Amino acid sequence: MPSLTVREARLRRHRRVRGKVQGTAERPRLVIFRSNRGITAQLVDDLNGKTLAGASWLALKKSFKGDKSGQATEVGKLLATSAKQAGVETCVFDRAGYLYHGRVKALADSAREGGLSF
C-alpha cells in the first residue's frame, strides 16, 4: 500500500470531517484555508450554498509587519467584524484537516475574542 502525501492525507481528513460538520444560516461553518503565504477564512451556509462572510490575508494593510501567526490573528479579527456585519454570532469550526495549533489556533482564538462563539 503506497503511503499518502501530506496533501492527500489532509484532504482525506477534511472529507472525513465534512461528513460530520454542516453549516446552516443560523450557525454557519467557519472554514479555513492555509497556504504557505497566507490564510483565509469564510463563514459558509451549506444548506443554501452561500458564503456569508470572509476574510483573507490579502485584505490586511500593506503596513502589516509580523509573522504568519500574527497574520492569522489579524485575519481572525477581520472575520469577526465582517461576521458581526452579516449578523452572525455563532458558528461551527471546520479546521479543514489542518492540525489545531499554530496559525489555525491563532485565527480561532482571535475570532473568539472578536465575538464569534464556537
Image (cartoon, rainbow, N blue to C red):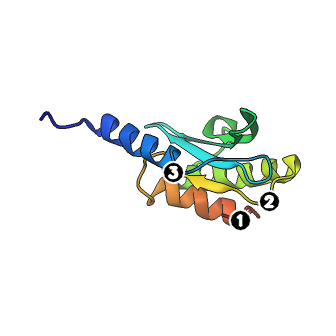
Q: Is residue 59 above or below residue 92?
A: above
Three-letter code, disc 3: Arg
Give the image location of residue 43, x and y in percent: 70, 44
Q: Give the camera-side residue of 78 and 1.
A: 1
SS category of the residue bearing label 2: loop
Three-letter code, disc 1: Ser
Residue 19 in view here: yes
Residue positioned most to the left: 1
SS category of the residue bearing label 1: loop
Give the image location of residue 24, x and y in percent: 73, 47
Three-letter code, disc 2: Glu
Query: Which quarter shows the C terminus?
Result: bottom right
Give the image location of residue 44, x and y in percent: 69, 41
**Disc 2 packing (10 Å; few <14; some 14–19; many ≥20):** some
Give the spatial CA distance, label 2 vs label 1.
Answer: 6 Å
Residue 67 in view here: no
Q: On the image, numbered disc 3 is attached to which residue?
A: 95
Point 65% across, 53% down: residue:
76
Q: Is residue 20 above or below residue 55?
A: below
SS category of the residue bearing label 3: loop
Give the spatial CA distance, label 2 vs label 3.
Answer: 18 Å
Q: Give the camera-side residue of 54 and 66.
A: 54
Picture quadrant where residue 47 is located: top right
Picture quadrant where residue 50 is located: top right
Say whether disc 2 or disc 3 marks the residue closer to the N-terminus: 2
Residue 117 circle label:
1
Say whether disc 2 or disc 1 marks the residue closer to the N-terminus: 2
Residue 11 circle label:
none
Residue 89 circle label:
2
Answer yes or no: do the residues labelled 2 and 1 have beta carbons within 8 Å?
yes
